[in-house]
Image (cartoon, helix red, strand yellow):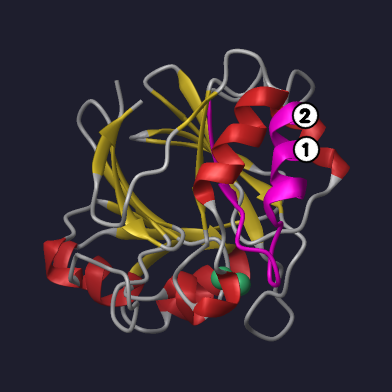
């Protein structure tokens, strides 16, 4: 059982058996956030790319918790210059951390800093695989996560807000390719430009993938998967 807290936007706290991770902790300036950076306890801060709505409060949270920041290498180096411990990875690379295995995946998006590359994240935690797609459009190499380079994805966190990332229709296609057991939509309803109907996504995705459960937690909500 993994306990997740949805921070709003693309932010999640993940509690495993013994470790706390936070991904893309955008709280300060996030109009839907219910948490402050001081509320977040984590030993690891994972960032997908350099945009402010993803790096967010990563540095203050890492400083307050003496946490390790993990992300694309150029971004990890840049954040490391702000006085935090950081671990850089490259697309396709994997590493075994104390909390479990992490792989960086491609994401098709802007990096948010010069010369960088945005990423998605696959985590193997307590024997289950979770995919946080980051900010990305649909791309067919997502199929590789379902039985080629990964044995499959149990839990997928997918953007649905459109404009900057996949919208609902493309995210439903991603569900058919990934065949996860649980999907949580993200990167929507934070701002008017990325408004999306999560109930419509849930209906369409569950109709498209037999056995799929789509969870639509509200910002601040805790759920288990
Ligand atoms: Ni972005
Ligand atoms: Mn974003």
Front-most of residues 71 and 171: 171
Side of 134 where 58 appears, left or right? left
In this rendering, is residue 7 above or below 103? below
**Tag 1's secondary structure?**
helix
Q: Residue at x 76, y 58 (%)?
A: 137
Q: Nearer the viewer, mark 2 or mark 1?
A: 1
Side of 198 where 217 appears, left or right? left
Residue numbers of the magenta segment: 155-177
Q: Residues within 10 Å of mark 2 (few under 14, many from 20)?
A: some
Q: Position of residue 162 (x, y in %)?
A: 68, 64
Q: Position of residue 72 (x, y in %)?
A: 60, 62
Q: Are marks 2 and 1 in contact (CB under 8 Å)?
A: yes
The residue positioned farthest toward the right in the image shown = 140
Mark 2 CB near ligand 2 (8 Å cut): no
In this rendering, is residue 59 above or below 186? below
Q: Position of residue 203 (x, y in %)?
A: 59, 33
Residue matched to label 2: 177
**Magenta stretch: residue 171 in it?**
yes
Distance of mark 2 from mark 1, alpha carbons?
A: 6 Å
**Magenta stretch: residue 66 in it?**
no
Displayed-image quarter of ligand 1:
bottom right
Kindly identify which numbered label has been placed on residue 173.
1
In this rendering, is residue 81 above or below 12? below
Kindly identify which numbered label has been placed on residue 72.
none
Q: Residues within 10 Å of mark 1 (few under 14, many from 20)?
A: some
Front-most of residues 162 and 68: 162
Side of 207 where 84 appears, left or right? left
Q: Residue at x 70, y 86 (%)?
A: 114
Confirm whether residue 66 shows in the render.
yes
Q: Quadrant of residue 215?
A: top left
């Amino acid at each position: 059982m993994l306990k997740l807290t949805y921070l709003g936007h693309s932010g999640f706290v993940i509690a495993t058996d013994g470790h706390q991770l936070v991904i893309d902790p955008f709280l300060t300036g996030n109009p839907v956030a219910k948490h402050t950076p001081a509320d977040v306890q984590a030993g690891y801060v994972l960032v997908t790319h350099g945009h402010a709505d993803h790096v967010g409060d990563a540095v203050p949270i890492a400083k307050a918790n003496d946490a390790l920041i993990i992300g694309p290498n150029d971004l990890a180096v840049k954040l490391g210059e702000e006085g935090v411990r950081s671990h850089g990875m490259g697309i396709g690379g994997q590493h075994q951390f104390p909390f479990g295995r992490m792989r960086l995946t491609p994401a098709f998006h802007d990096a948010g800093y010069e010369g960088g590359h945005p990423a998605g994240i696959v985590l193997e935690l307590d024997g289950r695989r979770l995919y946080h797609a980051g900010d990305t459009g649909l791309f067919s190499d997502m199929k590789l996560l379902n039985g080629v380079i990964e044995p499959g994805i149990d839990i997928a966190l997918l953007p649905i807000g459109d404009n900057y990332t996949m919208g609902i229709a493309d995210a439903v296609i991603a569900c058919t390719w990934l065949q996860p057991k649980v999907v949580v939509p993200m990167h929507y309803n934070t701002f008017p430009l990325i408004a999306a109907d999560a109930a419509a996504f849930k209906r369409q995705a569950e109709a498209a993938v037999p056995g799929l459960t789509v969870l639509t937690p509200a910002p601040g909500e805790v759920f288990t998967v």
